[in-house]
Image (cartoon, rainbow, N blue to C red):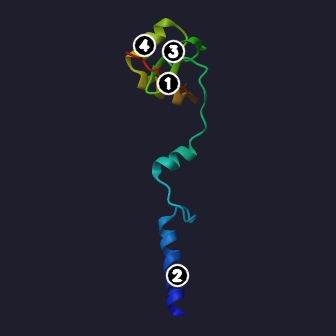
Amino acid sequence: MKKIFTLWIMMGAAISAAGTEGTGVAVSSETAAALSAPALKPQTHCPVLTDETVSRRLYVDSGGKRIYVCCKSCRTEVRKDPAKYLAALHRMGEEAEDAPPAEAVTP
C-alpha cells in the first residue's frame, strides 16, 4: 500500500512539474503565443497602402497564401517581398486567405 501511495505522489509531482500554470498540460511557447494572440480577420485592406480597400481581382499568390492588393503598383511591391506584406497584414489584424491549389500541367 505504501508503494502505491508513493507512486501516486510521484506521478502527481511529475505532472505538476511538466504542466503550465498547474494545469498538468505541457504547452510549447509557440502554442502559447498562438492561443494568446487575437483572432485575425479576413483581409479587407491593402498591405502596402493600408487605408485602401483591396480589389478581389488583384492579388499575389505566395507560400500558399493569396495576398490581395488595391492596385497594380501595390501588386508589383508585394511581388518583391511577399513575406514582408504577410507580416504587415498580421500587424493590421488581418489574414491572407489560402491560395487555391495550382492546377496540374499535363505534358
Helix, strand or loop under label 3:
strand
Quick one: label 4 or label 2, which is nearer the N terminus? 2
Q: Name the mark nearer the viewer: 3 or 1.
A: 1
Q: Is residue 107 left or right of residue 30?
A: left
For marks 4 and 2, give the CA distance: 60 Å
- The amino acid at mark 2 is Ile
Identify residue for label 3: 59
For marks 3 and 1, give the CA distance: 15 Å
- The amino acid at mark 1 is Pro
Identify residue for label 1: 101
Identify residue for label 4: 77
Helix, strand or loop under label 1:
loop
User: In percent of the image, x 42 and y 17: which residue is there?
Assistant: 105
Identify residue for label 2: 9
- Is the residue under label 3 in contact with that under label 2 (CB below 8 Å)? no
Quick one: label 2 or label 1, which is nearer the N terminus? 2
